[in-house]
Amino acid sequence: MTTHRIYKMSFSRVYPNYIAKAEKKGRTKSEVDEIICWLTGYTQDELETQLEKQVDFETFFAEAPRLNPNRVLIKGVVCGVRVEEIEDPLMQNIRYLDKLIDELAKGKSMEKILRK
């Protein structure tokens, strides 16, 4: 299996980009955190601990307390690839997160983003 560079990239290094993308469109850091916690099962404190530890994406998702079973409802294209067709589970989870942040930046309601 191919190891992508992003797997070893520090999650805490990319996290500010998620926030910047959301804030540029009038959304908030707390909404970004809510999305991340919904997807991974981390509490806010656990998320902050992961950021402080500067874990890589692979570790971030491997240590996720409970990946949300409704994440399979996330559909669409990220980086030219349909997220529902990605075969590598780790890459799919990373792209799910990218897609949710994209939806936030595009102005979707949190209810729709969190598949309620």
Image (tube, rainbow, N blue to C red):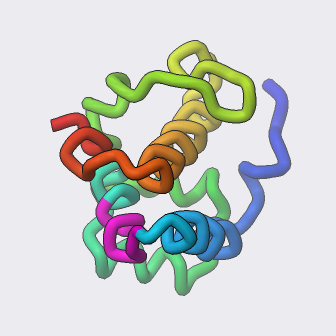
Placement of 66 over or under 46, stated as above or below: above
Residue 85, image x, y percentages = 58, 13
Q: Quadrant of the N terminus?
A: top right
Residue furthest left in the image: 116
Q: Is residue 47 magenta?
A: no
Residue depicted at 63% across the width and 77% down the height: 54
Residue segment shown in magenta: 27-34
Q: Of 111 and 87, which appears nearest the observer? A: 111
Residue 64, image x, y percentages = 40, 54
Residue 62, image x, y percentages = 50, 50
Q: Quadrant of the C terminus?
A: top left
Q: Of 63 and 88, which appears nearest the observer? A: 88
Left or right: 111 as drawn, with respect to 31: left
| Residue 6, visible in the rendered structure | yes
Residue 46, image x, y percentages = 34, 74
Placement of 21 over or under 49, stated as above or below: above
Residue depicted at 69% across the width and 74% down the height: 13
Q: Is residue 31 magenta?
A: yes
Residue depicted at 76% across the width and 51% down the height: 6
Residue depicted at 39% across the width and 58% down the height: 36
